[in-house]
Amino acid sequence: MIFNSISYIFFLFIAVTLYWILPAPSRRWLILGASLLFYGMWRIEFVPLIVFSALVDYYLSLRIHASSNPARRRWLLGVSLTTNLGLLAYFKYTYFILENISYLGRLFDYDPRADVGAIILPLGISFYTFLSISYTLDVYRRVFEPVKNFPLYLAYVMFWPHMIAGPILRAQELIPQLLATHRLSLNKIVSGLKLILWGLFLKVGLADQLAPWVDEAFAVEPSVLGGLDVWTMSYAFGLQIYFDFAGYSFIAIGSARLLGIVFPDNFDWPYLATSPREFWKRWHITLSSWIRDYLYLPLRGKHFSDRSAGGIDVRADDDQGLARPIAALFLTWFLMGLWHGASWNFALWGLWHAVLILGYRLWKKNVGHAPLWWTALLGWFVTQPLLMLSWILFRTTSATRSVETLARIFDVSSYQQLGFRENFYLLTFVFFVGMVALGLATRHRHRFASNVWLTYAAEIGATAVVIFVVLIFFRPLNQFIYFQF
């Protein structure tokens, strides 16, 4: 079952209706049952795996909380992390590890072969693994007291709106909401439906319309691409993945809102960012915040936050020397890249962003700039192309193909050839300009808030357009891109 399907709309309608009919103590059981059904409709045989993983973390967290022995607490934490990361490594990285071992063996005239059979990647394993890890670590850090009700904990892990691809919520952000007695209100229903509608518009009306063009472009051999082709591919996929993932996030946030549960924002017009640092305060905010608090800040020896907000907004100015923050930066982004996919092109994608952030830090520290409008505009013009080019590394099928594709932008003579149909260039340009214009209008809407009638007219007109587009293009053609991670 996917969000952009009639079956999900039917499922959501039934779940929300029953949720508000049932008494408060029964609602948690409904959420758990609906979540098990939602996941089981994909592959029911993986449900026991998730339950096992959750049971291990639930038990170990209680033991960690009850213990006052630092060594024992660290040992229990190690068992929890080993279990979670071991399952993730097996399902997601076994082929990758074996391929690299085989490659190294061939360098020494030895080809080790291992047949592990077919390994199916459980849907959302990267995301629910992060949920479990954050829970155990927060208990270990004594940020959160573990719950003593396993079905409640399992409902937190498997809560269907965010289980598959986020937003990634901490236990202290979601579990109290699962325990709270929510009251039905028209505002919750309307705001939830608006978010779902907007998410469907982004997915079926924009992302899925770009998808065939992007797939066709990335299937072309790099040697026949022109420089303008590569730039167009990078912008087109950058837009597709943004519309696709932001669309998913809006539907997830809206689905939870229909139950009275509030999720933090996951996107904030990231392509309006004027620096690489600002981009990661706006893109996949809950993941960026998770990486900040459970990987990056610990590597730097800094105090962590306990909220899924702010993204990776960390200054390096207070460090003595540069070695530790630089090492933490590159290790964090290397692992961030591999988390997205078991391939070296994903690792290169992560390192690309590490270089961009480091370059921005050094420039900011040694040169800096006054907060003027033209410096922000210049920062945007420099940042956006570099961000978009990184998507070549993300979308291509191998590191070699990524490098070959990116090399085409440096071949000046190649700009004279166009490898795609003219409509692809035009569609990408229109989508990008439209996205930027809408983002600016949204961020500056307060300037028009005094004119109530103009505000109402704009909202009604936009809603009508969104509904029309969704009705025209609504069909479950494509999975969400982040489902594969």
Image (spheres, grey):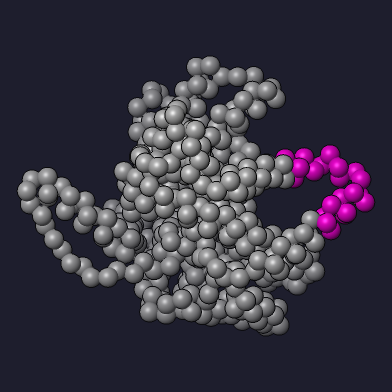
Quadrant housing residue 18: bottom right
Above or below — where is 70 with respect to 260?
Answer: above
Above or below — where is 443 with respect to 9?
Answer: above
Residue 28: in magenta span: no
- Looking at this view, is 178 or 101 the one in front? 101
Q: Residue 298, image x and y in percent?
A: 40, 42
Quadrant housing residue 75: bottom left
Q: As drawn, is 322 to the left or to the right of 239?
A: left
- Looking at this view, is 376 or 255 the one in front? 376
Residue 448: in magenta span: yes
- Looking at this view, is 303 or 353 the one in front? 353
Q: Residue at x 53, y 16 (%)?
A: 367
**For the stretch drawn in magenta, what is the main secondary structure?**
helix
How many numbered callouts?
0
Q: Residue 454, image x and y in percent?
A: 90, 49
The residues colored magenta run: 439-461
Q: Is residue 238 at least partly visible in the picture?
A: no
Q: Residue at x 83, y 56 (%)?
A: 461
Q: Residue 128, image x and y in percent?
A: 45, 63
